[in-house]
Amino acid sequence: MSTYVYGIARADHPDPEKEILGIGAPPRPVRIVRAGELAAVVSDCPEELRPKRRDLLAHQHVLTEAGTAGAVLPLRFGSLSEDDEAVRSVLAEHAEHYKAQLDELNGRVEYNVKAAHREESVLRMVLTEEPEIRALNEANQASGGGAYQDRLRLGEMVANAVRAREVRDAHIVESALTPKAEQSAPGPEGSGWLVNLSFLIRREDAATFLDAADHLGKEHPHLELLVNGPLPPYSFVRPARTAQPAE
């Protein structure tokens, strides 16, 4: 049976005081596999592993529970090894890399911020604050809707103005929040957002970051902000490089 790996910790990371259940149906008990100065938080892997909501939440739950006992380098959902011995081999091969990553991310959490326009608010802003668009819109309304070419021109002008605001507002969000974080990185792929960024935050700075996000939302009410966290710092884990054979 394959071994499912949730994260990597120091070898002195304690075994769970109480049973932690991970992925699978029924959920598999979590255990610690040690090799040298490192350890891996693992469980048996079910025969069919799919990114179901239940298992995605279980993966994050394990990392949260394990993280209460010390720093854990989170791996993304679906990290597998052939067996426990293969896990030990990987830990030994990349020991220096993992130890450096544990030092860098110790005491850090991730916040993901997504931003989108509130469509009706932005359209109102464009129609009232852009002089040329406002004039054409008023002329069209005064003539009972305007000629086809005038309506088409108005639609193109509005679309271009909205796109310009998307670029400007994305910069506003990034400029407001990036200084409050140690690092930023593109968030998980998705559509419909003008901003999707993940931020690396020291735990003690989380309140300052959240206050900045709250202030940003109040200052720009036409923006819909979604802040998710604290999360394990998935976006800031660098993959270990496997040495390439010499040619």
Image (tube, helix red, strand yellow):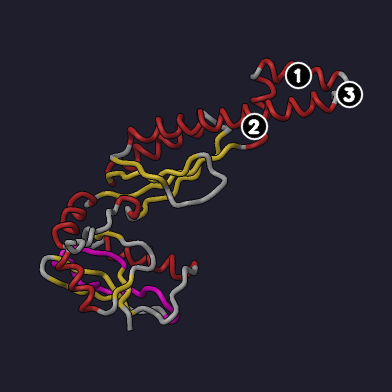
Whole-percent x and y of residue 105? Answer: 24, 51
Q: Is residue 128 above or below residue 115?
A: above
CA gap between label 3 and label 2 equals 24 Å
| Nearer to me, 136 or 116 | 136
Residue indicated by mark 3: 144
Q: Is residue 24 above or below residue 101?
A: below
Residue at image position (69%, 16%) is 132
Whole-percent x and y of residue 131? Answer: 67, 15
Q: Residue furthest right?
A: 144
Local SS, label 2: helix
Q: Amino acid at mark 3?
A: Gly
Q: Is residue 165 above or below residue 2?
A: above
Give the label, 3 or 2, closer to the camera: 3
Residue indicated by mark 2: 121
Report whether residue 199 is seen.
yes
N-terminal of the pair, mark 2 or mark 1, is 2
Instruction: Please identify the quadrant where the N terminus is shown.
Output: bottom left
Q: Residue furthest left?
A: 36
Q: Amino acid at mark 1?
A: Leu
How would you rate the neighbour count of disc 3 (Cα within 10 Å): few for under 14, some for 14-19, many for 20 or more? Answer: few
Q: Is residue 113 above or below residue 148?
A: below
N-terminal of the pair, mark 1 or mark 3, is 1
Question: Is residue 19 magenta-colored?
Answer: yes
Stretch of the chain drawn in magenta: 6-26
Local SS, label 3: loop
Whole-percent x and y of residue 40? Answer: 23, 69
CA gap between label 1 and label 3 equals 12 Å
Question: Is residue 119 magenta-colored?
Answer: no
